[in-house]
Image: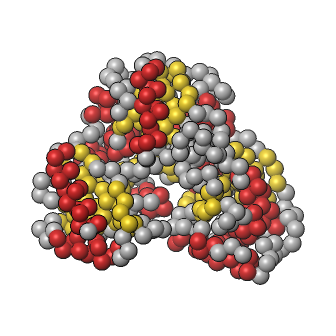
């Protein structure tokens, strides 16, 4: 019997297959999803379902669809897709959806990201806890199909071309200077979506020469993990950018909803710099708009937003918090340190591909190399996220807070301490593991290194 409390996380479902969950659990989750949609008064009869390239995806998606159909809702099967393709379908068709993916997790994992119509997020406080409870009750009673065999219809639909056309309408690359672009798909869904959006697979060619790395869809990830947040997984892209003399490199994670950038020297560009770059472009189109950033993005981000006439608003880390704050403020754009980028023009949902289009447009509309362009948006030195295993997270955070009584404290998400010289650090507990996550930023590398080592010593002693 599956214990769904082990796999239903703060924002999604994620666990190993078949150890932690299987097709029977997926069917119960599908039935529960349909029930909760009814309870929330969610309009529409159909549910959209897509999956990534993992071997367990088709079976889990089919079982979930059976549970949905047993509750009287029809299913539109999208087949292979990226997470942002599912969000596009949900927004364009006005229907709820479920994406089967474990993002950057290893091959034995799979999961579900669910949304209401219009790509509205479903998290613990917006239906996911209730879905878990209902599905667990069905599993405990051994009745994943309370309404009997599936009776509602299912149809197959291909929305790849519509997704590509929609994104290209938002950012026009047809008149930029020619660019050579290395793209590392990591054997994930970027290998499916990049040829459609940036290449000529379904639409006319753009002035881009795409050099593909690992475009073969393979959920075993034979070359490297599809997690570009880990510097080890950028090494192949960095090498290829230099070997091919490319102007820029792009790396996508497993479900292709996050995009990382490497400049012409093979150096990674901070997601905070991309957040600031895209914010400036969006504010040029929509002056005076609000832009959301999470509290771990660089201090340069709110500075640059203000300089371009925008209103920066800080939010907690996590897509459900970002999306809720964007909807509340009608923000034009939102960015996170983890390379999730959110757009009002994309139903407030995250899409790495649209951020990539903005970055390519910014590079191709002028003659500066990517390193110089990115340098305009990078003003401070950051540590990146550093994890430490800690048994009593709350006690350790309190201990660190007491060590810096002179610092300005903020507890929006974990503990953020700011110092008069512009240095700051954030220490926050993981939602799922006994970890404390540390991020440090300072005006100089020496100051950042000193503060990082000092805080880590306190955390780990």
Q: Is residue 136 visible?
A: yes
Identify whether 395 is placed above or below 257.
Answer: below
Q: In the figure, is residue 56 to the left or right of 14?
A: right
Identify whether 204 is placed above or below 380.
Answer: above
In which quadrant is the C terminus drawn?
Answer: bottom left
Identify whether 155 is placed above or below 246.
Answer: below
Indicate the position of residue 4 as horizontal and vertical percent values: 63, 72
- Report the residue at 15% width, 59% height from top: 419
Instruction: Tell which residue pokes out farthest to the front in this image.
Output: 461
Res 241 → quadrant: top left
Indicate the position of residue 80 as horizontal and vertical percent values: 70, 44
Q: In the figure, is residue 338 to the left or right of 196?
A: left
In which quadrant is the N terminus drawn?
Answer: bottom right
- Report the residue at 18% width, 74% height from top: 402
- Report the residue at 53% width, 24% height from top: 211
- Of 263 and 128, nearer the camera is 263
- Report the residue at 26% width, 75% height from top: 398
- Of 288 and 251, nearer the camera is 251
């Amino acid at each position: 019997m599956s214990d769904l409390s082990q796999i239903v996380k703060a924002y999604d479902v994620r666990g190993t297959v078949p150890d932690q969950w299987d097709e029977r659990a997926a069917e119960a989750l599908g039935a529960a999803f349909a029930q909760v949609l009814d309870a929330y008064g969610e309009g529409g009869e159909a549910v959209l379902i897509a999956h990534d390239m993992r071997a367990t995806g088709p079976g889990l998606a089919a079982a979930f669809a059976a549970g949905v159909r047993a509750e009287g809702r029809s299913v539109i099967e999208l087949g292979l897709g990226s997470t942002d393709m599912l969000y596009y379908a949900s927004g364009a068709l006005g229907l709820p959806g479920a994406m089967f993916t474990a993002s950057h997790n290893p091959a034995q994992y799979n999961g579900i990201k669910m949304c209401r119509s219009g790509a509205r997020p479903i998290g613990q406080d917006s239906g996911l806890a209730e879905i878990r409870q209902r599905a667990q009750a069905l599993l405990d009673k051994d009745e994943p199909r309370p309404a009997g065999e599936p009776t509602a219809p299912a149809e197959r639909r291909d929305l790849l071309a519509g997704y590509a056309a929609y994104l290209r309408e938002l950012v026009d690359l047809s008149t930029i200077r020619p660019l050579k672009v290395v793209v590392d798909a990591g054997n994930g869904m970027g290998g499916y979506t990049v040829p459609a959006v940036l290449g000529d697979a379904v639409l006319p060619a753009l002035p881009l020469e795409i050099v593909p790395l690992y475009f073969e869809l393979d959920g075993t990830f034979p070359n490297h993990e599809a997690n570009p947040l880990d510097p080890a997984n950028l090494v192949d892209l960095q090498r290829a950018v230099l070997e091919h003399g490319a102007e820029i490199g792009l790396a996508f994670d497993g479900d292709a909803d996050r995009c990382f950038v490497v400049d012409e020297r093979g150096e990674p560009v901070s997601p905070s710099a991309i957040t600031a770059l895209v914010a400036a472009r969006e504010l040029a189109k929509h002056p005076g708009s609000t832009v959301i950033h999470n509290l771990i993005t660089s201090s340069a981000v709110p500075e640059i937003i203000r300089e371009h006439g925008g209103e920066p608003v800080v939010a907690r880390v996590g897509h459900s918090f970002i999306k809720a704050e964007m909807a509340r403020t009608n923000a034009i754009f939102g960015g996170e340190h983890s390379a999730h980028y959110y757009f009002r023009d994309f139903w407030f949902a995250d899409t790495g591909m649209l951020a990539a289009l903005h970055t390519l447009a910014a590079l191709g509309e002028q003659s500066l190399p990517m390193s110089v362009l990115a340098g305009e948006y990078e003003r401070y030195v950051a540590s990146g996220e550093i994890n430490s295993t800690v048994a009593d997270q709350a006690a350790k955070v309190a201990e660190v807070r007491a060590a810096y009584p002179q610092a300005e404290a903020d507890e929006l998400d974990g503990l953020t301490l700011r110092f008069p010289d512009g240095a700051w650090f954030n220490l926050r507990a993981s939602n799922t593991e006994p970890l404390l996550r540390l991020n440090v930023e300072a005006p100089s590398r020496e100051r950042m290194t000193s503060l990082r080592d000092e805080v880590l010593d306190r955390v780990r002693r």
